[in-house]
């Protein structure tokens, strides 16, 4: 994996998200109440709602447009909804959030 530093963990609100613009597109980066980080595509599979503006609860996010709930771990829609978002490896190192740029490059190729 090829990791890039996208900012400080403290720049992401607890149980919140930030939208990160990369050369390979926009990525929603989420921080849970337990200080875990997850990175996904920003568009909900239902109607393209901005997931970075959604509500983070546990390891899930609820889309702000139509309340679809998506797993931050797997990208799968929860409950009766069907769909999936892309997920990308992310980690915390020394208080900094790192994102695997190689996974973003594969997104371009797909």
Image (cartoon, rainbow, N blue to C red):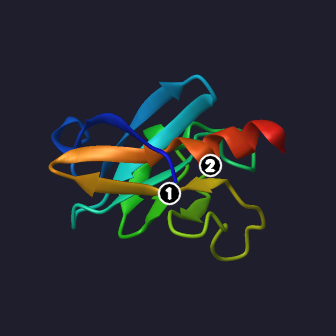
Disc 2 and disc 1 in contact, CB within 8 angstroms: yes
Q: Residues within 10 Å of mark 2 (few under 14, many from 20)?
A: some
- Residue depicted at x 67% and y 55%: 85
Quadrant of the image for the C terminus? top right
Q: Is residue 108 above or below residue 54?
A: above
Looking at the image, residue 49 sits to the left or right of residue 5; the answer is right
Of all residues, the one furthest to the bottom in this rendering is 79
- What's the CA distance linking mark 2 and mark 1? 7 Å
Q: Position of residue 106 (x, y in %)?
A: 72, 45
- Residue depicted at x 66% and y 47%: 44
Give the residue number, with chain letter if any, for mark 1: 89
Of all residues, the one furthest to the front in this rendering is 2
Give the residue number, with chain letter if any, for mark 2: 103
Q: Judge by depth and name the residue closer to the eye, 59 or 107.
A: 107
Q: Residues within 10 Å of mark 1 (few under 14, many from 20)?
A: some
Looking at the image, residue 50 sits to the left or right of residue 6; the answer is right
Q: Judge by depth and name the residue closer to the eye, 65 or 57.
A: 57
Q: Is residue 54 above or below residue 67?
A: above
Judging from the image, what secondary structure is the residue with disc 1 in?
Answer: loop
Q: Position of residue 88 (x, y in %)?
A: 55, 54
Judging from the image, what secondary structure is the residue with disc 2 in?
Answer: helix
Q: Judge by depth and name the residue closer to the eye, 29 or 56.
A: 29
Q: Position of residue 14 (x, y in %)?
A: 21, 51
Looking at the image, residue 34 sits to the left or right of residue 56; the answer is left
- Residue depicted at x 66% and y 67%: 77
């Amino acid at each position: 994996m090829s990791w890039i530093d996208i900012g400080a963990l403290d720049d992401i609100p607890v149980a919140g998200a930030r939208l990160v613009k990369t050369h390979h597109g926009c990525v929603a980066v989420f921080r849970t109440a337990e200080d875990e980080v997850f990175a996904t595509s920003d568009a909900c599979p239902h109607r393209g709602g901005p997931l970075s503006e959604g509500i983070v609860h546990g390891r899930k996010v609820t889309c702000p447009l139509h309340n679809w709930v998506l797993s931050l771990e797997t990208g799968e829609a929860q409950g009766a909804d069907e769909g999936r978002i892309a997920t990308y490896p992310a980690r915390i190192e020394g208080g900094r959030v790192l994102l695997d740029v190689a996974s973003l490059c594969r997104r371009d190729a797909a």
